[in-house]
Image (cartoon, rainbow, N blue to C red):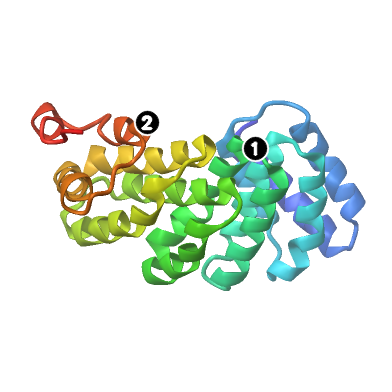
Amino acid sequence: MRKREAVELGNWVRSLLDLGDAERAFSLLQPLLQRRVPFPRLEEVGRAMALPELEMMDPFLERIAASRAEGGWVIIAAALQCYLEADLPAVFARTRAFIVLADVWYACDIFGERVPGPALLQDFDTALSLLAPWRHDSNAWIRRTVGVAVHHWAKRTRGTPECTDRAQVLLDFLEPLLEERETAALKGIGWGLKTMGRYYPEVLTHWLEEQLYRRGKYPRRLMVQKAITYLPPPFRARIRW
């Protein structure tokens, strides 16, 4: 499927939803849900099919979610991304619900990179405030999503000097998760730290030193191993644990 075809399909789905024919709209998507399609093409479909109001999309997004297809989560996440500017709290609430419903690591990562991650780039302070309770959520996938969102932010900002202060803010934001015990969540948090270390090595190294030595925080070994993955040797040598 080419980009043009994906956009056309999304437009057809949107047209049918406008007409109130959700059944035919879903039948157009079913072939995509039953086979592997590159994520960028699924994202094009999701963005193109988005209706003007999020509430108008809810029943159809839930119908896609009921299929439990991997590609369906991508389509849903891409559609939700269209409403970030209009209603960030509502988008976060729906994203959390879909992650819990999916109950699988790849859906968590799909949403993390397409909703809270982009939200941090678009409206840093508001997104951070909405993510704050996710750090203490009872669901491990939600806690994991916090790390995935940080990973996305670091990957997109790529060490830009103007973003250094925010990198520090994000690392301090992750501090409560250093004591995470569930591997499913820990891997996502470690992923966020790893990408921060790739693009903000000095900031991450100083922060880890502070956590390991000055505050008496001792993260699990797996988390530290992930965090130092991309650190240059001189920086890695400073992390003694």
Q: Assign a secondary structure to mark 1.
A: loop
Q: Is residue 203 visible?
A: yes
Tell me if I can see residue 47 in this picture: no
Q: Image quarter for residue 3?
A: top right
Q: Which residue is mark 2?
A: 222
Query: Residue 78's x, y, as percent?
Result: 60, 51
Label 1 vs label 2: CA separation?
Answer: 20 Å
Q: Indicate the amino acid at tag 1.
A: Val
| Mark 2 residue type | Leu
Rate crowding at label 1 as few (under 14), some (14 to 19) or many (20 or more) other CA atoms within 10 Å: few
From the viewer's side, name the closer residue of 9 and 40: 40
Q: Which mark is residue 104?
A: 1
Q: Position of residue 110 (x, y in %)?
A: 56, 42
Q: Residue at the far front: name it.
A: 216
Please indicate whether residue 143 sits to the left or right of residue 95 in the image.
left
Indicate whether 124 appears above or below 35: below
Q: Work out which quarter of the rendered image holds the N terminus and state it.
A: top right
| Residue 164 relative to residue 28: left or right | left
